[in-house]
Each structure stands twice: as structure tokens, then as C-alpha cells.
Image (cartoon, helix red, strand yellow):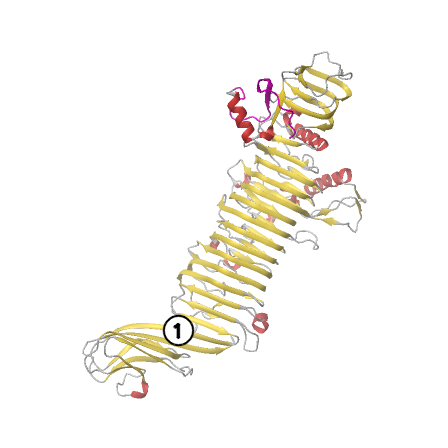
Amino acid sequence: MKYRPSYPFHAILFICVLVFHYSCAKDSDLFTDYIIEENPEYISVIDLENALRIPSDFDWTNIPEGYENTVWEITGSFDLEEASIRLPEGVTLYFNGGELTNGTLTGSETLIASQGSSQVFDAISLTGTFENDYIMPYWFGAAMDGVTDDREAFVATLAHANTLGLKVLVEKDIFLDVEETGTKSIFLEDNTWIEGANDVNIIVNQILSPAFQGILADGITIKNVTFLYDNAYNASTDFTNSDRYANNTAIKNYMETYRNVVFESGVNAKTISATDFTAMFLFDASKNITFDGVNFVAKGDTADTFILMGIKFKEQYADNQTITSSGGTTDICRNVTLTNMVLDGVIMGIQGPVIGLAVDGLNSFRYSDVQTAQGTNIGWVNYTFPPPHLFYLNEDGSLDYDPSNISIRNVYDHGKYVGNSDVRGGGGYCNSLKLIGASNVYVDNYKSFRRDGLGDLGGITNGVFKNIYAESTIDIFNPTFGFTSLRFVGDLTNVTFENMTIKDNSEILERYPLDVTGGDYVTMDNVHVYVNELLHTPHGPFGISGSNNTILNSSLNIQNHTGTETYKAVVYHNNETLDNGANNHYEIEVNGWRDISDDPEGLSIRMLLQYASNTNDNYAKIIDTANGFTIEQESTVKQDAWTRTEEVELGSGTSQLLNLNIPRNLYVQRVNLTTLEALEDGLEVYLSTSGNSTSSNSWLTEISAITGSISKTFSSTTAHTSSQALYLVANDDFDNQGKILVELVLGRTTVGN
């Protein structure tokens, strides 16, 4: 803002163009200080001591000399009678209850200010240069009571702001009735700036047409305003072709009028789906868009009163061309910045293809899937509405365009679901983050508490996902749908996941909340998966089918494993990778795996890393902490190590059967024996595979007679073909004296999977 030169304080009036919670009449010194300190951009400094009060018979067509660089106080109503008035240089038009009507006013470094919030222009065209940073809707007739329809006055304000290169300031609640299919959308021109103050609400009611549209626009800024949605949709009535045609025709007419686009007969503007037009903001191939401190809030409490879509990015034909039946050159949205936003009561949040999206600071609260007030027609009639997400960025439209240069930081999706708790019978769900076909992606500090899960990722190239936390409840879905909290729907290339926790709160699960995926040069570092009861044991959740992939410092945590399926892999590769995968390196810890004692071969953790025919280098290690079981595979050679322990109190006799055994297909790698309580004097005790104390060829090792440890390592890797019992045998009666800790390390060596 350009201020007037300084004057003595007693001769200065601070004209308040921003209304606060208390009046300007209160303690003017204190209020002035507050305004200057907190909101200096919203005030004008005006010298009223030398102001010229414009008389009622003032001849606007013959302005006297000496009126330049002065303040004109306008208290009356003046009809300019369609005259074109050119103001002297440096005039301040101070409206103190006055008004100008019916004419054209050309400014020359002119400043507009008003006392109060009454209309000051009616049927006035403003041209020339004006010193204001902001103009106000009430200057052009807006009632701004939150009830009266102020759409026409708001559109007029935007038009004047566009002509003069000024910003629009909305300081009081304003209602814009835009609910009429294809006719009432407000089109945003290049360099549109809409800013709010006083926690203001812009109340809109659109359903089948956007409230605001930017068509091939360059430079749109929306700041510090809440868009309050006050309407209800009907999910039992499907979209019609006439709805789509009306909206697309409005875009076509706009492009022909303002964007120098010619459409041949029968050709229309580019569109994808009728649901595009349910967005509150629809941007067709627009660029340099900024939302800062903007909230999207549904006034209603039920899902049918929620905002259907917040922001939609869409492909469109570029300007300055003729569109033929074979098409034309198109583009998509570029360079969008969203900071410090709130979405509360929004079904589809931010959707579509975009190049250059920077999000920093977004809170999402209430969400839902589309449905009627009674909770029926989830997903709309015939599932017309796509499964909604907070972010849904994909290669929507031409295959030539993919989302790229995406940065999403500091997002908190509180996941407050509203409506029928059922899900779509035909599949599809409302997880938080969906990114498809995107490149150069950076996601940092993303939290999701949506019951539906964290997200869908697919076809990502050059991505970083770090500091991610998600809690879900995915048992709401039929497990045959294959939905997980983090689902991969396409291969990844050069993507890193770092410091990620995926936790599912379902009481019983039949799928892991983390999906296996495919791709090359993918890294997972410090990725942890948590489930409660695992009833079914699917393959996974770790495995990246491809080459040059790494998983480190990561874990699977199961509170209660009740699954009975055998030969299930925690590390899983598809057949192509088993045949040809190279340079994959995995290190994973599993906590809470089921007891494998009854069938250590079938119930134990398995890995599917590579076939014996694959000569490439790969490495994987899984530690099963609950069973003391470790699998380690280097290239084609896989080594299992199972540590089993038993504390034995000696009874009577010379032979005592242990609960421990050596299962078939395993061999003994090492025996550690610790005497916890001393044996009978002179007693010789051995660990044996035979209950016969004199069968020395079955003895594995002698046991220390006094407290202490003995270890023995075995070189043979020949597995037992049948299960072998274990005994403690002695040269004399145990005499109920002594306690021994037996630790048995068993091994299994195999080649390939």
C-alpha cells in the first residue's frame, strides 16, 4: 500500500476498512496502535483537516483547479449521468455516507476510502490508476450479512479489481448463491486476489456446478477466508448428460470470449466426468495458484451436507488456438501452493493432475463417502462418484500429463468419519493419500487416522515419503477386496520410505495393513507394521519385486497370531524377481509370530527371495523374536537358525526325556548347557538322542556337574530325516538333584526357494 505523507496526529483520521470485534470509536489511540501493529495493510492514513467537502451541486464534468492531491469528502449521492469523469492526480475519495452512480471514473493515483460499510458505487466503471491495495464488495452493493445473495456485487467487485489490478478484501460474512447448473459459477480472471479478515465466511451452496472456476487463469490468490458450504446433495439421483453439457458449454463460451479459443462446430471444451463440476473450485489448466489460510467447512452435520469436492485440477485446451474434431493442444494446472488449510466436512479433498504442487500445513477433520441423508446409495447411484480421498493426484486426462514436482508437508488427517459405517459393496474406499503416476514426490510429516487407511501409491518415480504415521481399521472391508492401509497399485522407481508406522486397530485382521509392491531402487528404512489378532497369514507385508531394493531397521509386530496357513512368506517376491532379481537387501524383525513348535517347517516364517536358478546377489535376514528363529539368505543359500531352550529339574532314574526335540529336516548347530543347580557328586550327565544312558554314540555333549556352562558346536549340516527326541542321561541315579538349562541351536540349509 502507498501511504500519504505524514501529518500532525491531531489532523489525521485513520479510516477503518477492516471491522474488528470492537468499534473504531473506542479508545482511538489504542485502537489505532493495534491496527497499525497488526494489520497496517488494511488502513489508509487520511488528512481530514484540509479535506474538501464536495457540495451537492458539484459539477463532476468541470472539476476546478486546485482539487488535485487533496481529500474529497463525499457525503451526498451524485448521478454522473453516464459521463466519463477523469479525476485530478492524487485525489482521495473519502465516502462518508455518500455515493457515485451511473458513469465512468478514471483515477490518477487515486485512493478510495469509506467510513462504514455502505455502498459507494452503483453502475460505475472504474479505470485508470488507484492507490488502494484492496477494494471491498460493500462498495459495490454487497449487503454482507451472510444471508442476502451478494453474488452480483461480488462479481462486480472482482471485475473492478481485475481492471485496476487490485485485491478484494472480504471483512464480513457474505453469501454467494451459485446453485444453478452451468450459469452461476464465478469465473476467476488472471491475477485475482481474494483475501479475508475477521475470520470471515464466504458462504456458497453449489452442487452440480463449481462455485469458482479458473479457466486457463494465471495468478490466483485466496487468503485467510473460510468457504462455508450450506446445501445438501441427493445421492439417489444420478448425474445427467444435460448437467455435464451445461457446465461444459459455460466453459466453452468463456474460452471463446476471454481466451481466444475457437471451437469448430460440434466440438466442445475438454471434460472428463460430470463429477468434476461438483468441485467448489475447478481449475482448468490454470497456473500460479495460491491458497493461504483457507478453510473449506461444511455447515451441516450429516454426510449429505458435506462439500462434494474441494479443489479439482483438470486438463483443458490451451488458449489462442482453434479446436477441431481431432482436438488441440492441451495443458494441465501448474505451480499450486496450499498452506495452512483446513478441510472439515469434505468428501473429495484435492483431486486431479498438477505439475508443481506445494502443500505445507493442512488439517482435515470430518470426511465421508457420498450417500443420502439416510445413509443409502454409498458412492452415489451406480457408484458414479469416484472413491474419495483427501488427496487424489493422478494422471487424469491425456496420457501425456502426469503429476510431478509434488511436495506435501505437515498434514494431519484426523479421520473423523461421518455417516453410514458401511462401505461400497463394489469396492473402492476413502483412504487419505492417493498418488498415481507421479514423479518427483516429497511427503514429510503426514499423519492419517482414517479408518479406511493411509493411501494408494502407484507408478511413483523419484519419491521420498518420511515421518509417516497412520492408524486404520481396515476390517470394515471384505478381505477379498484386497484393500490395505497402504496399498501399492503400480511399480515404484527410486522411492524411499523413511520413519513410517502403519498401525491397524482392527480386532482381527486377514490382511496386513502394508502391501507388498514392485519396483527398482526402492528403500524402506525404519518402517514398522502393527496389527492386533492376525487370523489369516497372507504373504508379506515386506517385499519389493524388482532389483536394487532395500529394507532396513523395519519390523512386523503382531499382538496375537492365530493364523494356521503354512509356508507363508514375510518377504515375498513375484516369479519374475525370483528368477532375475538382483541386489536386493532386507533386514526385518518380526515380533509376535505364532508358535512354530508343532510344525517348524510349515508354521515358521518363510522368505521368497530368489530361485536356485537365479545367480544374482541378493540378501535377506528375518529375526523371529518370539520363537528365537532367524532366516538368513545370501544369494541362493538360505540358512535357518532356531534357538530353543528348556529348563530341566532332574528327577530320579538315569534317563529323563526333554520337551525339546530335533525336528526332521533340521540339524544341530550348537548346544549350550548351563548347570543352574549342582548335580549329585560324582554324577556324569550327558545330553543324548537316546534314552539309554550307556549308548555313548548318541551323546551330544557332557554336562558340567557344578554350576557353569558348556558349549559345543557341530560341523555337520546333515539334517535329520525324522524327528529326534532328546534326553538327559546319567551314569547313576539323578537323585532329584540339579537343574540344567538346555539351549539348542538348530539349523536348516536350503538352496533357493
**Left or right, residue 301 beside residue 656:** right
Note whether residue 352 is visible: no
Residue 200 x %, y %? 56, 31
Where is residue 403 drawn, in percent x and y? 64, 52
Nearer to the camera, 138 or 369: 138
Q: Residue at x 68, y 51 (%)?
A: 397
- The quarter of the displayed image where residue 530 is located: bottom left
What main secondary structure does the magenta stretch of the protein show?
loop
Q: Is residue 5 magenta?
A: yes
Of residues 147 and 143, the one nearer the viewer is 143
Image quadrant where residue 494 sits: bottom right
The N terminus, quarter of image: top right
Magenta region includes residue 569: no
The local crowd at label 1, few if under 14, some if 14 to 19, many if 20 or more residues have their Cα within 10 Å, is many
Report helix, strand or loop for mark 1.
strand
| Front residue (pair 485, 223) | 223
Residue 419, percent across and down? 50, 43
In the rendered view, does 382 fall on the left or right side of 746? right
Q: Which residue is mark 1?
A: 642
Q: Is residue 99 above or below residue 152?
A: above
The image position of residue 187, as x and y in percent, is 69, 36
- Indicate the amino acid at tag 1: Trp
Q: Report the number of numbered marks.
A: 1
x 69%, y 53%: residue: 401
Span highlighted in magenta in the image: 1-25
